[in-house]
Amino acid sequence: MTNRSRSFRVPDKPSLDGIEAKWVDAWDESGVYHFDRQASREDVFSIDTPPPTVSGSLHIGHVFSYTHTDTIARFQRMRGKTVFYPMGWDDNGLPTERRVQNYYGVRCDPTIPYDPDFTPPAKPDPKKQVAISRRNFVELCHRLTVEDEKVFEGIWRKLGLSVDWRHTYATIDESSRATAQRAFLRNFQRGEAYMSEAPTLWDVTYRTAVAQAELEDRERPGAYHRVAFHRPDGTPVHIETTRPELIPACVALVAHPDDERYQDLFGSTVRTPLFDVEVPVKAHRLAEPDKGSGIAMICTFGDITDVTWWRELQLATRPIIGWDGRVVAEPPAGVDSAAGREAYAHLAGATVHTARERVVAMLRESGDLDGEPRPITHPVKFYERGDKPLEIVTTRQWYLRNGGREPELRDRLIERGREFTWYPPHMRARYDNWIEGLNGDWLISRQRFFGVPFPVWYPLDSNGNPRYDAPVLPDEATLPIDPSSDVPPGYTEEQRGQPGGFTGDPDVMDTWATSSLTPQIAGGWQRDPDLFDRVFPMDLRPQAHDIIRTWLFATVVRSHFEHDTVPWRRAALSGWILDPDRKKMSKSKGNVVTPIDLLEKYGSDAVRYWAANGRPGTDTAFDEGQMKIGRRLAIKILNATKFALSVAGSDTEAELDPATVTEPLDRSVLAVLADVVEDATAAFDTFDYTRALERTERFFWNLCDDYLELVKVRAYETDAPAGASARTTLLIALSTLHRLFAPFLPFVAEEAWSWWQEGSVHAASWPEASQLRTAAVDGDPGVLAATSEVLRAIRRAKSEAKLSMRAEVERVVVTGKSVDAARVARGDISAAGRAATLEFELTDDPELRVDVTLPPGSEQSSQPSAG
C-alpha cells in the first residue's frame, strides 16, 4: 500500500448489463492472460487443462469444474506466477462419430471409395443414413467439430476463463496426432505396447473393442435356466445359466475343487444338450459352490470369468457370437453330429435375444430344461456409452502394459500416485483401488474411423496374409501418418493390398490413448523443447473424480514410461453436479442443464459463485438459488464500491497511507481483514477455493452491513484526522476485497477496480496480510465484533418496534466483560444508532448485553437485547 493519488471514474448507475462482453474484449486486447515465454520454470504455474469432449454442447457440469480451475489460475497469477493455462478440445472418438452420424444422416463404410464432391443430405434422416467412405466421414467429423469448438470457446470466454487462447489444441489436430503416434512408437519399441489376439470386450452396436476402464454395470432382468448335461451313462448333470444361447460355445463344466458333490466328475467328460459336444469337467477355485447348482458351464465367451477359466485351464475355443452381435453362420469346431448341426442351424444369424428364445424352446422340447426359467435381476456389463450388453469376441488388438498382469509394474504405478499431492487427499485411495483391481493390460485400439491411426504397416506374404510379426514403422520425422493413405518406406502405392506388398493397420487409438498425453501435447513435447522445459511436469491436473481410473491413471502410465516421472505435482479433483433427484448429470442420462441460458439470466459471475461454492471433490446439487445470491453479491460489490469511493471523495486526491489509520475501529477492521487474507491465502494454497470465497464473502457483508454504517458520518469529516482514518480504511479494504473476489467474480471485480485503479485487477498482486497488519498497528479484532453487536442490537430494537432505522434512540446501555472493545468506538455507535445517550458498564457477564430505550410512544419503549 503506497501513497498514490487517484481520480475516480464512478458511473452514475452501476450495472451488470453488458459487463461480460466489455471485459472479455478488453482482456483480449491487453493480453493480461498471456503466458510469458521468458519466465523461468520456478516462476511458472502450468495447468494440464481437461480438454472437453466436443460432441454437441457443454453442460453445467463443465461450467462447475472449469470454474474451479480458473479460480486457481487467477489466484496463482496474482501471486506472481506466470500461468500456463491452455485449452484443448477432445474431438476424436465415439461421441463425435455418433453426433456426426445423426447430424448429417450418414454412416461410415470403409469399403466405399472417396467421393471428392460428396454433399451431405439436405434433410438428414438418422434412420436412413447414407453410407460414405471413411475419408468423407472423417472430413465431416472435422467440419462439425470445428463449429462445435467455436461455440465451446464462446461459452468459456463468456464464463470468464482466463485461458491463454493462443495456446489451444485439438486431440485430432496434426500436432496431437504426431505426439500420440510418437509416444506409441516408443512404447512399442521399448516393449510397453504389443499386439495380441485374445478375447476382447466388444460393443456390438459400435462394433469396437472396449477397455476395462470404460465399463459400467447396469441392473437388467434375466433368468436362471436349469439345464441338463449328460454323463456317458446318460445320468444328468444340472447347471444353472443365464445364457443358454451359449451352450454351443461350451468348452467345459467347472466346479470348486473342494465341492464334494462333484469329486467323481473331475477328470471325466459330459455331453452338451442339443449340440452333442463332449466337454471335460474341471476344478477351479473361482467356481462358487453356493451359486446355483455349484457347477457351471464355461463358454467362449460369456463373461470375464469364462476368459479366466479358459486361459488358466487351457481349454478349447468355440466362439459363436460375431462382431455384429449375431450368431455366426458356421457352427464351431466340435459341433459335428447331424443333430447338433441341425440345432445350430436354427440359431445362425439370430441376435443374442432371439437365439436365447430358440435354445430355451429346443431345451424344453428335448426335456433338458428342468422346470421353467427363474426370473432374476442382475448386473450386466455395458460400454459406458452403449445401449446393448457387451459380448466377448476374439480379436487382434493393441495393448499397453499398465500393471494389470505385472505385480512389479502395478506396485511402481501405485508408488507414482504418492509422488504428487492429491486435493482432497482421500481421492488417492480411488487411484490405488483401481490399479489393484486391474485384471489385464490397457486395450488401446478401436475399430472406428475418427481417431489417431496406428502408425504401422504390415508386409503381405505371397498369399496376401499380413505378417503381424514383422511390422513396418515410419520414421518419427514423418509423423503424423495415416497408413490407409500413406505408403511405408520401400513400397509403392500399387503394392497396397497385393501379395508381396503391404497393408496398413486399420484401427485407431482409443481416445484416452491421446488424451493421456495432454501434458505432452499442450507443452510441446519434441515440437517445442523450450516450452516443454518451462511447463513440464505440470503444476496442476484438475479433473473430475470419476475419471481417475481413465484420464488420470492413463496419464501417469504414459509419463512413467516416457519420462520416468509423474506428469504433474498436484491433482485437484472436482465432484459431480447432481440433479434434483441427487443423480449425476450426464448427457447419456438426458438430465443435463446447458449453461448459456443461466449465464444470460444471472450473469457469469453469479454462475461462477454457485460453482465456487462446490467444495473440492464433493458432489454438488444444481441450485439456481445460489446463483441468485451470487448475482446479489455482484450488485452489492458495485454499489458498495460506489458508496466507498463517494465517501472518499470523487475526483479528489485520496491517499492510501497506512499512517492515517488512527481510530481503533478502523484498525480493528484492518486486523480482521488481515486474518481474512491469511485464511483465504492458506485455503487457496491447498486448493480449497470454497473456503477462500466463504471467508471473503462473510467479511464483505459484515463490512457493508456494519462497518460502513458505523463510519458513514465520520468518513464525511473532511477536516478531521478521524475522517481521514475512515476514508483510508475504506479504500484499503476496497482494494483488498476487489483482489480477494477477483478469482471468483472476475467481471464485477474488474469493473469496480477500473473505477479507481489503473491496469487490471487480474494483473494486480494478491493482498498481503502483513501489509494490512502494518496498517492496523495494534488493532484489536474484538472492537469490530463488539461494535457490530451493539449496532445490530439497536437495529433489532427499532425493527421490532416498527421504527425507521433513522429513528432516534433515547438511551443505550451496554454491559458485559467486553464493553471496553465497544467503548472505544462510542462516537461511531452513537452516530450510526442515533443514540442520544450511550453508556458502558463493565460487568462479569461474558455475553455483551445491550439495553435499548426507545422514544416515548413507541410500541416498545425499552427492550433488553443480547448481542
Image (cartoon, rainbow, N blue to C red):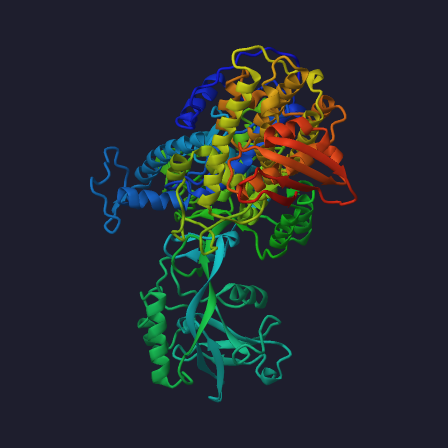
Taking 718 as reference, is 589 above or below it? below
Quadrant of the frame with the N terminus: top right
Q: Which one is nearer the viewer's eye here, 136 or 458?
A: 136
- Image x and y of residue 441, in percent: 57, 52
Q: Residue furthest front?
A: 856
Residue 53 is drawn in which quadrant? top left
Image point (43%, 56%), residue name: 202
Residue found 52% across the figure and 52% down from its top? 213
Q: In this view, does 110 lie to the left or right of 425?
A: left
Front-most of residues 241 and 53: 53
Residues 411 and 657: in front is 657
Residue 320: % across, % down: 40, 65
Of 393 and 574, nearer the camera is 574
Which of the image's four quarters has the C terminus? top right
- Name the residue: 24% across, 36% down: 118
> Is residue 51 something that shows in the picture?
no
Q: Which residue lies furthest to the left in this view?
A: 122
Q: Position of residue 232 (x, y in %)?
A: 49, 86
Q: Is residue 386 left or right of residue 186?
A: left
Image coordinates for residue 333, horizontal then vertical, percent: 42, 69
Label count reads 0
Can residue 670 be seen in this snapshot? Answer: yes
